[in-house]
Image (cartoon, grey):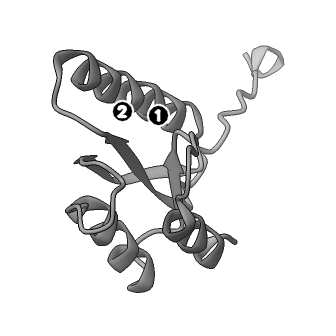
Amino acid sequence: MSGNLKAHYIPAIPKREKRVGIYCRVSTNSSEQLHTLAAQVSHLTRLTATMPQYLLTDVYMDIATSKTGSSRKEFNRTVEDCKSNKLDMILTKNKIRGDHENDIRYYRKFSV
């Protein structure tokens, strides 16, 4: 029997080290825009699932225009969660049109 012993290597499960948030936004609640929002969330959720080191912490979604004064509660919550170190990384679909200087400033501020 001692000649038939085999050792099996079982690799460790990687630790999920990066706390990730997903931020998605559309400008209206039309059915086309809501479909786009769902596609964004689905794509980024699948992307997160393929990365063993990512731990999906929260999903943030806004339906709002980028005009000054529009309510973007989830964007603001994302910023607060970054400030309080609840997130290590934010995944978002990057589509910059026009003047989104505030968004760019926040992304640069929290970039690692």
User: Given the image, on which type of amino acid does mark 2 rest?
Assistant: Val
Along the line of sight, the residue nearer the viewer: 64 or 84: 64
Along the line of sight, the residue nearer the viewer: 63 or 61: 63
Q: Secondary structure at mark 1?
A: helix
Q: Residue at x 56, y 49 (%)?
A: 98
Is 93 on the left or on the right of 64, as rendered?
A: right
Q: Residue at x 59, y 65 (%)?
A: 104
Residue 31: image tag: none
User: Given the image, on which type of amino acid does mark 1 rest?
Assistant: Leu
Quote the CA–CA distance across marks 2 and 1: 5 Å
Is 100 on the left or on the right of 21, as rendered?
A: right
Q: How many marks?
A: 2
Residue linked to disc 2: 41
Q: Residue at x 17, y 17 (%)?
A: 31
Quadrant holding the C terminus: bottom right
Contact check, label 2 and label 1, Cβ < 8 Å: yes
- Residue 53, above or below 26: below
Residue linked to disc 1: 44
Q: Secondary structure at mark 2?
A: helix
| The quarter of the displayed image where residue 36 is located | top left
| Mark 2 surroundings: few (<14), some (14-19) or many (≥20) residues within 10 A | many
